[in-house]
Amino acid sequence: MNTFVCTTREESGKFRTVVDAFPDIWRGRVLDAGCRSGLLKTALEGHRGFDVRYTGVDLQLPAQVVADLNQTFPFVDRAFDIAVALDVLEHTDDLHAAFDELCRVTKKYVVLTLPNGYELKGRIKFVFGLPLSGKYGLPVEAPRDRHRWLFSFTEAREFVRVRGARHGFCVKKEGCLLGPQRARLRTCLTTPGLADLISPWYLALLGRSDAR
């Protein structure tokens, strides 16, 4: 199992780590699904030699394309070379359909991260009756955004492998994505099953078998 460690605790550090994890793929048209403020674009621009044409999609500006990822993506088949969804799919009502759309619109690669809802910090909070995060619970006022799905690292890995294969993709590289504070625990991840306890995120690169 590969282990990737974020350079900083800030979200920008996670995006830079994802870009660095797969240095040889960043060529051509890149779709950033659920781009938020465009941190992936910033991470890509920070590397010399990457020749990308970036398109960010989200519900609001500053996305280049404003669209709802709960619906069919507004792009033709294989319009992009790389489709990226970093901490995005768990926000969609139909995660399965959104994953299928990522596969449909790319001709080469899919890069994604999924959160591990079974990791240690979350388990401790649940035991003591503390809120898991602002993405769960039952607030009095309707929130604008929520996590719709709760799953483990193992479930995320199985989902990506099996569902990706149905669309002609195989996992090229995958592993545990850790924050800097958990870097010291990386040696523990050689023990089967501990990824569910230790790793906050599952990170995967999928490649299309008939990519041209």
Image (cartoon, helix red, strand yellow):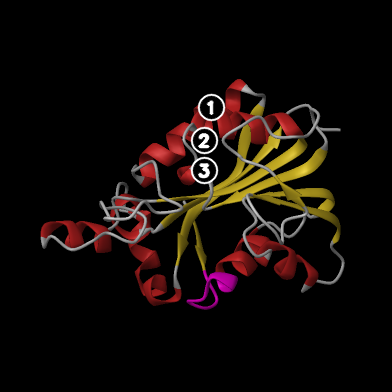
Residues at badges 2 and 1 in contact (C-beta under 8 Å)? yes
Distance Cα–Cα, label 1 vs label 3: 14 Å
When the figure is inspected, residue 89 is found, relative to residue 100, above or below; the finding is: below
Disc 1 + disc 3, Cβ < 8 Å: no
Q: Earlier in the sequence, mark 1 or mark 3?
A: 3
Q: Earlier in the sequence, mark 2 or mark 3?
A: 3
Query: Residue type at mark 1?
Result: Arg
Q: What residue did someone put label 3 on? A: 89
- Which residue, as the protein is rendered here, is positioned at the far left? 128
* Residue positioned 45% across, 40% down in the render: 157
Q: Which residue is mark 1?
A: 163
Q: Secondary structure at mark 3?
A: helix
Quadrant in which the C terminus appears: top right
- What is the x, y in percent for residue 57? 70, 49
Please name which of the two marks, 2 or 3, marks the residue nearer to the observer.
3
Q: Quadrant of residue 70?
A: top right
Is residue 22 shown left or right of residue 159? right
Q: Residue at x 28, y 56 (%)?
A: 139
Image depth: mark 1 or mark 3 in front: 3
Which residue in the structure is indicated by mark 2? 160
Circle 1 — which element? helix
